[in-house]
Image (cartoon, helix red, strand yellow):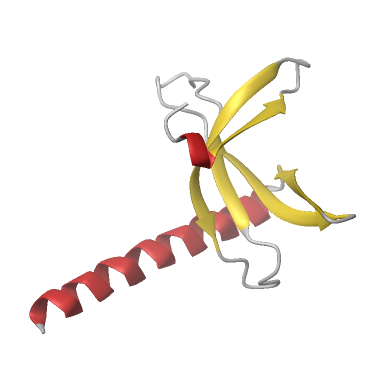
Amino acid sequence: MKYEDLSFTTTNKDGLEVICDILAVVPNPNNSEEPYVIYTDYTMDENDEFVKQYGKVIEVEGEFVLKTIEDEKTISLIKHEAEDETVKYVNEQIQENIS
């Protein structure tokens, strides 16, 4: 667990409880009430990099639930939105430092 307030426990596809850390919260261009989340459970891929997982935060009966996304088209959208947010942040920082 890297950041206690950005961590959660879930059950993986093998039925084991795992601790995950949120890497980014990304605005959902289709629904501002349900942002996307990029997270990891620190499993490694064949390139020894952490596997990133993608989800959407939704409200069900007053509780917030993370719905895992596996659709490649939606994942591509999330990655694109995350890149846009990073570029936007860097540009804001540059403008502040110039002023």
Direction right: furthest residue: 61
Tell me if residue 78 comes above or below residue 72 in the rendering.
below
Q: Quadrant of the C terminus?
A: bottom left
Residue at (51% x, 41% y) in the render: 6
- Residue 39, by quadrant, is top right
- Where residue 3 appears, as percent x and y from the top left, is 44, 35
Tell me if residue 79 comes above or below residue 67 in the rendering.
below
- Residue 49, by quadrant, is top left
- Where residue 61 appears, as percent x and y from the top left, is 90, 55
Direction left: furthest residue: 98
How many numbered circles does the render carry?
Answer: 0
**In the displayed structure image, the side of residue 4 where residue 86 appears, left or right:** left
**In the displayed structure image, the side of residue 8 where residue 33 appears, left or right:** right
Tell me if residue 7 comes above or below residue 72 in the rendering.
above
**In the displayed structure image, the side of residue 88 where residue 92 appears, left or right:** left
Residue at (66% x, 47% y) in the render: 55
- Where residue 16 appears, as percent x and y from the top left, is 72, 15
Tell me if residue 6 comes above or below residue 95 in the rendering.
above
Residue at (18% x, 78% y) in the render: 96
Residue sitting nearer the eye, 28 or 46 = 28
**In the displayed structure image, the side of residue 42 where residue 57 appears, left or right:** right
Residue sitting nearer the eye, 47 or 30 = 30
Residue at (48% x, 20% y) in the render: 44
